Image (tube, coloured by chain):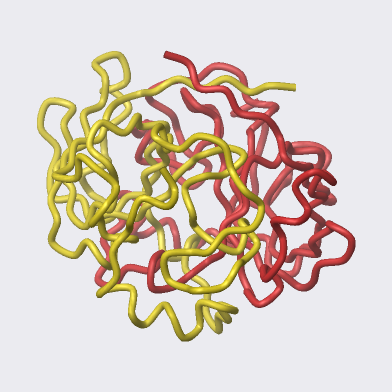
Chain colours: A yellow, B red
Amino acid sequence: MRIEFQPIGVIRTPFTKTEGMPIQPTGAAGVKGTVEVFEEYRAGLKDLDGFSHIVLLYHFHRSHGFNLHVVPFMDSQLRGLFATRAPKRPNPIGLSVVQLDGIENGVLRVQNVDILDGTPLIDIKPYVPEFDVQPDVRTGWLEQARKTVHDRQADDRFR
Amino acid sequence: MRIEFQPIGVIRTPFTKTEGMPIQPTGAAGVKGTVEVFEEYRAGLKDLDGFSHIVLLYHFHRSHGFNLHVVPFMDSQLRGLFATRAPKRPNPIGLSVVQLDGIENGVLRVQNVDILDGTPLIDIKPYVPEFDVQPDVRTGWLEQARKTVHDRQADDRFR
């Protein structure tokens, strides 16, 4: 069985290549970008401007193939792919929570983008703490590493 | 341009029909399910058991078509589709943060599932507060409604 999706817009950011990119929105604090929603979908943006943060789902369009074991940017050991956020996945879908600064004519101004310029947008969802935030969380191998994410950058290992 | 995905597993839950389902994991507290990852992808589950919570991306396989304006379960007014988590979307991808209780032979035991039985799994990502949690959040039309999500259930409006 195959599932077909098609882009509903495109994400514009200062990052034209993977090397040197922040790894996650937390490492991209203050980095501004835009999300251009195609005209036919713009009516669906009504009421979105009431939300301070949104979830972007997008296609890792520069990722090809995948390995089930990878050495993540934030580690030096092989980890199971699904225990990482690496872009080369069986279904290469990216997920980022970004800050929404405003919407004009189908263009969303966003902040804290850790996304490549030209990335195809798949979906936008409102970010809702009651749905998306969990208390008492354990984060396995990332427990130590995640505290340093602000200082780390991507390289070309997942091209 | 079209993007093709294919299921990497299937989600098993007590919910065989939409009516009466919880709306979000917060409304499904304690509801147990399993995520069966297909054999060819199981090696990618290594290290995942260190995480207490995971993000599931899945295909809303029972949703067909979409409207850009919808009346959400939690409201009585028409809202822009992208300001809601309604399942009928241009690209019907669902996102739930669930609790991970254990992994045996490629089967994940999860809790707080608000997902239909038989739902095709698209991706698993580790849930990491540093990436996924935002402070100082505004949630627009949901600001009042979200406090009551625990008590609300789905009906068949998005079938």
Q: Residue furthest right?
A: B105
Give the side of residue A76 with respect to residue B25, left or right. left
Give the side of residue A32 with respect to residue B63, left or right. left
Q: How many marks?
A: 0
Quadrant hosting residue A125? top left
Residue B48 location (% of width, % of height): 67, 68
Give the side of residue B67 with respect to residue B117, left or right. left
**Above or below A96: residue A148:** below
Q: Nearer the viewer, residue B147 or A141?
A: A141
Residue occupying image coordinates x 51% and y 39%? A92
Residue A143 location (% of width, % of height): 50, 83
Q: Nearer the viewer, residue A159 or B102?
A: A159
Residue A77 location (% of width, % of height): 56, 73
Residue occupying image coordinates x 77% and y 46%? B11
Q: Nearer the viewer, residue A116 or A8?
A: A116
Quadrant hosting residue A57? top left
**Above or below A115: residue A43:** above
**Above or below A82: residue B103:** below
Residue B97 location (% of width, % of height): 57, 60
Q: In which quarter of the image is the C terminus of chain B?
A: top right
